[in-house]
Structure formats: C-alpha cells, structure tokens
Amino acid sequence: MTAADRLPVYFISHAGPNQAVEKSTTADFFDALGKKWESFSGPNKPTSILVLSGHWEGERGVVKVRTSEKNELYYDFYGFPDELYKMKYPSVGSPKLANRVLEILGKAGIPAEAETKRGVDHGVWVPFLRILPTPKIPIVQMSLADMRHRPDEETFEYHIRLGKVLGQLRDEGVLIVASGTAVHNLRDIGAYMRSSQGVGKMQVAPYVAPFDGLLDQVALAKTEEERERLAVKDMAGSKYLRSAHPSLDHLLPFHVAIGAAGGDEGKVLHKMFMLSMSMSAYSFGEAA
C-alpha cells in the first residue's frame, strides 16, 4: 500500500450517552462523518476499525485488547433515562485484528493482554450509533494504559509511542479512531449549567477555548517533531491542563491519534464548546 492509500486517523470527542438520541451540532457532525467513511473506496476503503476510548485504561500500565467476536455493550454510566440502558449497537469484533494488535504491541515491547469479558463502552458505541448505525465491518476496542501515577510528560510520550506502533495498521486496511473529549471537566459542569440558566445563555468555562486552541496547534503543526513537542512539553506545562482535564483519560486518545498520524497533515473537523467541555474533532492523513 502506498502512502496515498494509507487510511486516515481520527480523534473524536464524545459526550454522555444521551448524545446517541439527542439533536446537536456534534450529532450532525457524526452523521456526516459516517457518510464520509462510507464513501471511501478502493484501497482507501477500510476492512476494520480499531477504537480507543477514554473510558478504558488497562491496569498497571498494561494495554488491553478485546479479542471477542461478539461486541457486547457495557453501559458504563449512571442516572440516565432507562431507554439508554436498552439501546443496542449491532457490531461485531475481529479476533484476527485483535491478535494482530497484540502481536505488534508485543514486538514493540508494550505490555498488552487479551480481554474477553469487558464489553464495548459508551465512548465507542454512543458516537458510533450516529457515525455507523449499521456497521458493515468489524470494530475492535482496545484500552489506554493506566499511568495516573506517572509524570504527565511521560504519560503523553508513552501514548504517542503506542500510537506510532498502531500506525502501521493504517497500511493494512484498519481505520484508527481515538475517542476522548478535547476538554473534559465533569466537576465544573453543574456550576456552569447553573450560571447559564441565570443569564439565559450558555456559559463556557474560561479554560475551554485556550486549551482547545492548544489541541488545534498540535493537530495543525507542520512537522512531526513540532507536533510532539507541543503535545508533550507545551501540554504538560499548560496552566490550563488540570482545569481542562482533571484526569487525563479523555485527553490521552488524542496523543494516540497523533502518534498514529506521524507527520501526516492534520485538519480541524468540528468545534463546539459546551459549559466545561469542548467537542472538537480532528483528522490526520485524510484526503482533500
């Protein structure tokens, strides 16, 4: 496969499970993204999809990969309407792809294990209900690495390295999708919701735009070296980091995406600020 045939990489921002049924500009974006994917043809038509979600971190730094052929759903959320716990997503897994992922991670010295019990979490099936309501190719979920007790720079570098290893799958018909949230502070949502009600319009936390802008800089960087410097040094040193991401789980998929992207051109696909969150999305290596 030539560089022109290499499949792109995507970072998408997902919200709560209600995103699967409610109207929003992000839901509209997902609908359009699915139509784009379905238009891919020839060597650019994916044979399977590999997804990482901010809702799954492998214990003790070990990356987990779902090897099951059946994609059971994991309803990993609380306090939502009953209808959301009855939703189904008719996708299948791919033991072949899962074992290939385990193989390349093993060769790269990244600790990884097969997972057969955990279902596919809402960081995958909620956005994919909009993107590909009736998927025609297998979808495999894998985890991030739990590195919460390590320095931020080390954690960012590790997940970029993870992405670099996975990047070779782009030449094997695999579409890589990293599902997180560009800015994700659930702790502050209630306060900004109340202040929005008080003034009659949406209030956005002051750290959302600046930190989201840093993600734009990373995605649009002209070289791989500049992209990685911004994503590691500048991001770890940002005064907005721990306001935008009190925990790093929803940011790390972005680092995996830029690792898999290498030096490929980045594009901003979607932007929406909401309270203490940003729903930005990016592509890397996508044809014009």
Image (cartoon, helix red, strand yellow):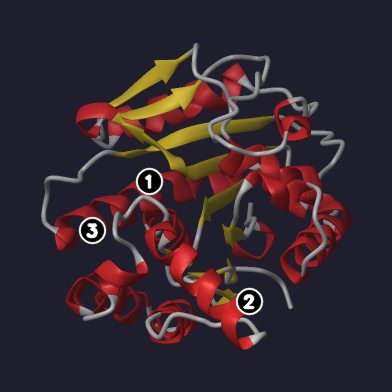
Task: Sort mark 1 into few (<14), some (14-19) or many (20+) by Cα contacts within 10 Å.
Answer: some
At numbered mark 1, what does the secondary structure look like: helix, strand or loop? helix
Tag 1 and tag 2, C-beta contact below 8 Å: no
Mark 3 or 2, nearer chain start: 3
| Snapshot quadrant of residue 252 | bottom left
| Distance from the alpha carbon under mark 3 to that under mark 2 | 27 Å
Identify the amino acid type marked 1.
Val
Task: Sort mark 2 into few (<14), some (14-19) or many (20+) by Cα contacts within 10 Å.
Answer: some
Task: List x then y, in percent, for residue 282.
Answer: 58, 70
Identify the amino acid type marked 2.
Met
Q: Residue at x 75, y 27 (%)?
A: 91
Mark 1 or 3, nearer chain start: 3
Q: Nearer the viewer, residue 241 or 231?
A: 241
Q: Which mark is residue 157?
A: 3
Please determine whether, in this image, residue 36 is positioned above or below residue 96: below
Task: List x then y, in percent, for residue 155.
Answer: 21, 53
Q: Which of 57 and 219 is in front in this view?
A: 57
Report whether residue 128 is seen: yes
Q: Which residue is drawn at 43% across and 77% down?
A: 215
Identify the amino acid type marked 3.
Glu
Task: List x then y, in percent, for residue 79.
Answer: 58, 37
Q: Nearer the viewer, residue 72 or 97?
A: 72
| Residue at which label 2 appears | 272
Report whether residue 49 is seen: no
Q: Which mark is residue 65?
A: none
| Residue at which label 1 appears | 165
Q: Nearer the viewer, residue 66 or 202?
A: 202
| Snapshot quadrant of residue 224 | bottom left
Q: Which residue is drawn at 49% across and 12% down?
A: 116
| Distance from the alpha carbon under mark 1 to that under mark 3 | 13 Å
